[in-house]
Amino acid sequence: MSAFKIFVVEDDEFYGEMLKHHLLKNPDYEVELFLNGNDCVKNLHKQPSAISLDYSLPDTTGYEVIKKIKEFNQEIPVIIVSGQEDITTAVELVKEGAYDYFVKNEETKDRLWNALIKIRENLSLREEIIELKETIGKQYEFRKAIKGNSSAIKKIFSLIEKAINSNITVSLTGETGTGKELVARAIHYNSPRAKKPFVAINVSAIPSGLIESELFGYEKGAFTGANSRKIGKFEVANHGTLFLDEISDMDMSMQTKLLRVLQEREFSRVGGNDSIKTDVRLIVATNKNLSEEVKKGKIREDLYYRLLGLPVELPPLRHRGDDIIILAKHFLEEYAKENKNKIASFSELAIEKLQKYPYPGNIRELKAIVELASVLANDSLIEEADINFNSAHGTSDFLIEEDTLQGYIRKIIKYYLQKHNDNVLLVAKKLDIGKSTIYRMIKNKEI
């Protein structure tokens, strides 16, 4: 952690030296004393970690100094030390960005000591978060985070690069399970906003009556049960990225409010009157066609044009060719590491089976299939029999392999005979075909 540098701004030199002496009892502190506000401002380039600021100064007021400090660096904590207790002044200074407000008395040096301990703890935590975000950013280097080498995914890489180098709203579309949130995170963590928050919210998962307070927050007493102020997602994501998944499920009244925020770049908490400025990069996602939703009257047309921005349509897995095997091997390695197993591999027949399946659940479904195969495999080689397709979309093995019409007819008849214990008469009735057709196919060993 870098040195913890403290500026003490105090026109009473004796009192200032007393505070400096007291703070230097901590060997990790560097303390510099200034007898007026202008000297403090001139030395801000030294990057103080915190500032103790006397409100009454010979050359200016603490109010003016704190404004200049915040203009230089919004993040520097400023503790106001005043010779008199003035609630109105204290409130104004806190609104201007003061960390705390103390009145000079016998407890001042101890209160200052404790406040600086908290500031240092917060600074340490903030540095840890920045390091963590940098680590996450490296993990989300999009050409590594998004697996694949197909022409379809290379087009997505090109669009991601364009999104990274601008602040435009991005609208992600594609079937469920195609990796829309992964792409959203890749855009954020490779953009200039990477060190600021990435906040994701699934619109469809929140009841319509709660979505406003979730996005904008609420004030204490705004409604029954609002026992304290809540900060909304727009406020949390300030200077970062807000990812709204399933945006097409947002109701009309909320769409109107969202449109206003996007136009005015400000909002109010529920039950509040203060306007809060917002600077967020918006990324939205849906598995529906937004333009079709506009035609159906489910999305406001003016909001649609605000949200469209840079459209990125993610390809379904079945259109990504050999990416299926690249992803399958990646999931296999992940599973092995998580479960401390020997890394397995796929047999040739298992690979063929994986390549022929249409994956209605896309990447999410492939991951589940690979994890199940890893459990079922008897050794480090995953065989064809270990690959099981139990799609929630109702796709069966019947259509996995392309066949002729006659071939499909044979499969259908064979399936019904097995289902009804080889009762030829019953199967002929159910399929509305002659029983002689079935007998002939049996005789010719077609089934």
Image: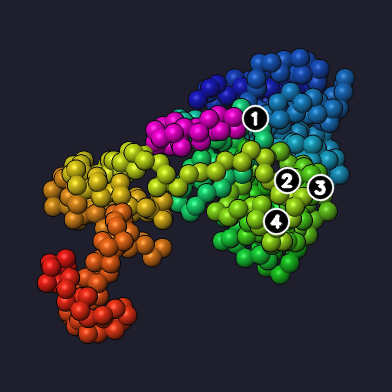
Amino acid bearing label 2: Tyr
Name the element at disc 1.
loop
**Label 1, on which residue?**
166
Residue 258 coordinates in the image, percent (x, y): 73, 52
User: 299 or 295: nearer the eye?
Assistant: 295
Residue 100 coordinates in the image, percent (x, y): 72, 39
How packed mark 4 is, by other alpha carbons closer than 10 Å (few <14, some 14-19, many 20 or more), is: some
| Quadrant of the snapshot with the C terminus | bottom left
Relative to 176, is 442 above or below? below
Which mark is first along the chain, 4 or 3? 3
Q: Which residues are magenta?
A: 142-164
Is residue 231 in view from this perspective?
no
Amino acid bearing label 1: Ser
How packed mark 2 is, by other alpha carbons closer than 10 Å (few <14, some 14-19, many 20 or more), is: few
Q: Which mark is residue 275?
A: 3
Which mark is first along the chain, 1 or 2? 1
Q: Nearer the viewer, mark 3 or mark 1?
A: 1
Relative to 161, is 231 above or below? below
CA–CA distance between discs 4 and 2? 10 Å
Name the element at disc 2.
helix
Q: Is residue 281 left or right of residue 366?
A: right
Residue 173 coordinates in the image, percent (x, y): 56, 47
